[in-house]
Amino acid sequence: MNRPVTLKDLARSLDLAVSTVARALADSPQISHETKALVRTAAEEAGYVADSAARAMRRGTSSLVGLIVPDVQNEFYSTVAKAISDCCHDHGLQLVLSITDDDPELELHHVRNLCSARAVGIVMVASANPARETVRLLRVTPHVQLVRKCPKVESDWFGVDDVAALRQATRHLIELGHRRIAYVGGSTEFSTGAARLEGFRVAHAEAGLDVAQAVVETGGCDAEYAYAAMARILGRPGPRPTAVVTAGARIAVGAFDCMRARGIDIPGEMSFVGFSDSPAFRWWGSGLTTIGLPVREIALACSAFLLRRAGLQQPSNALPYQAMHAPTLIVRGSTAPPRNARRTPAGGSRMAAR
């Protein structure tokens, strides 16, 4: 295999000093436009690629920005990745995507590699219990938390008002007349899971309803978990819930697939509220009611903030910056009043489907 073309090779072929070639490629004002054009043409023809590791040693940072997420099957995270990649491109940087599967050891591996590569900064969706070494490395590396707020990682955070998201969705169902509502959500180990369940409970309390009447399933974050959780809900003895609200993008997909597989009439037998706004949610029949999230806006704000912060020396006593974005309930055809519902005020002793 032929070895890569080096600066010395280019300089020798052009009969120029190595320093002149390096400055020409770096667009130095000390080099004439004619020489720059000559060097760039020769570099392109020879297939020269700059040694990013050596450049990182000189500058103290590379051109890399890390994005650490649990998975990319979740459309939320793939949208985030595209937005941050666009932001990096606009700044002459390159995004490096790392997937943890919420494994703290794998998370530490990715953080170490990004620190070793002298990344400009890291955007991360933290696991529930990051390793002590991960926390230590992040303290000396420009980074920002996205979506999840891990208390062990005391840093800047960009995310969604998760309490408001599930409060809106649940209140919508209650206002339609539903009194026995199922909830399928993620693990309460994560800030997102705990906050979304709180929003579900707050909506019940505000309506004077006993949340004990609700059917709650929490635990996983993927479609397989949600499918199984929805199957358990449908198989429970006693009155079946007349509505279900989901608290995660992949959770919504899994729960909905289970209901379709069981032949549940939506919204005739059960109303359904999804989470995030996948294009597929709009194509189903008259569309799925869901919680819309400003995903791209959050990701762009997060990455722009990180790049600004990476260029500044943050005071040691500075408080972490927190940005909470508002969700929007998008009402479509998957929610309706329950069959034979009596329109009675929420709360009190006259509740349907006790």
Image (cartoon, rainbow, N blue to C red):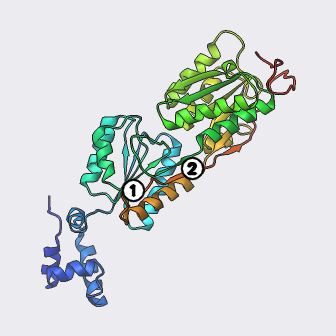
**Local crowd at mark 1 within 10 Å, few (<14), some, or many (≥20)?**
few
Amino acid type, residue under disc 2 in the picture: Met
Report which quarter residue 3 is drawn in. bottom left
Residue placed at 52% from the left, 58% from the top? 301
Residue placed at 56% from the left, 32% from the top? 251
Q: Tell which of 345 and 97 is nearer to you.
A: 345
Give how far across and how far down residue 197 sits, in percent.
59, 31
Give how far across and how far down residue 348 sits, in percent.
81, 21
Asked whether residue 213 is in view, the answer is yes
Q: Is residue 321 left or right of residue 134?
A: right
Q: Is residue 192 left or right of residue 8?
A: right
Q: Tell which of 232 and 169 is nearer to you.
A: 169
Separation (CA) of disc 2 from disc 1: 22 Å
Q: Under tag 1, what secondary structure?
A: loop
Q: Tell which of 165 and 16 is nearer to you.
A: 165
Q: Would you name the residue on which mark 1 appears? A: 317
Q: Is residue 238 left or right of residue 117?
A: right
Q: Would you name the residue on which mark 2 appears? A: 324
